[in-house]
Image (spheres, rainbow, N blue to C red):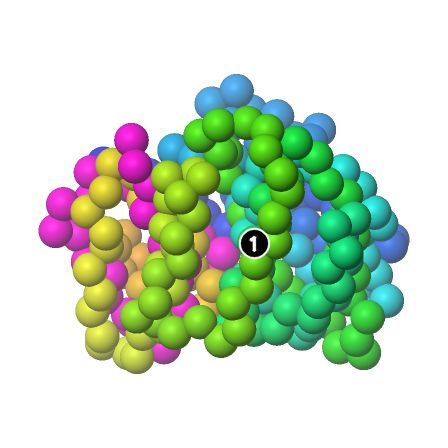
Amino acid sequence: MISVRRSSDRYRGGDPAAGIETLHALSFGRFYDPDNVRFGAVLACNEERLAPGAGFDEHPHSHTEIVTWVVEGELTHRDSAGHTTAVRPGDVQRLSSAAGVRHEERNDGTEPLVFVQMWLAPKEPGGEPSYDLVRGIADATPYALPAAGAMLHIRRLARGERSAVPDAAYVYAHVVHGEVALGEDVLGPGDSARIIAAGDLELLAASPAEVLLWEMSG
């Protein structure tokens, strides 16, 4: 089963007056839809756009696996566990908030910042917060998130190239760049698909494309 969600249907949030624009794929904050609370382990998939100098001041998180993918620009991350990092396109950042952590995220650069942030539910609550940053992850290197029973695959496809969708209980696909065909549907930037029992499903790039795929257990 495939359920396609279009970028134009995302909930609009953020604070445009402060240089923050957010598009939510699932219920988030004041945007609540009881039929769109989560998919598999995925609790949120937010597209964030921060103007130079804009950002999210220090705020708390708990019992959430937070994974960030920068599309353009550079994200400055600081947290209460002592990590200060600059996250760039091609890097995978993970913050396991566990029993509780505080962090801030800012665009300290001179160019606009665009990133996708995905929240996943851990199998077990609590524990100690942890942080990870993988620089320049390769297409062939999935990023494992065992705490959530999930694995992130990055697919960078040339026009006409095909790539298998993981045959998992749940797969969440988010198109970052370009257009891809998925079954009978064509997905563009910001579109997503929620897939149950993918089987032999494939992505076919209609243009150069970048796609994030979350493979999740049942």
Q: Quadrant of residue 88?
A: bottom right
Magenta span has 211? Answer: yes
203 left or right of 144?
left
Rendered location of residue 93, percent (x, y): 57, 60
**Pointer 1 residue:** 94
Quadrant for the N terminus in the image: top left
The front one of 55 and 3 is 55
Q: Residue at x 39, y 53 (%)?
A: 144
The answer to whether residue 47 shows anywhere in this view is no
The answer to whether residue 45 shows anywhere in this view is yes
Q: Residue at x 31, y 57 (%)?
A: 186
Magenta span has 188? Answer: no
Q: Residue at x 45, y 39 (%)?
A: 147
Quadrant for the C terminus in the image: top left
Rendered location of residue 113, percent (x, y): 70, 68
Q: Residue furthest top?
A: 34
Rendered location of residue 122, percent (x, y): 49, 34
Q: Quadrant of residue 53?
A: bottom right
Residue bounds of the magenta highlight: 189-218
Q: Residue furthest left?
A: 200
The front one of 181 and 43 is 43
> Mark 1, residues whose alpha carbon is within 10 Å: few (<14), some, or many (≥20)?
many
Q: Amino acid at mark 1?
A: Arg
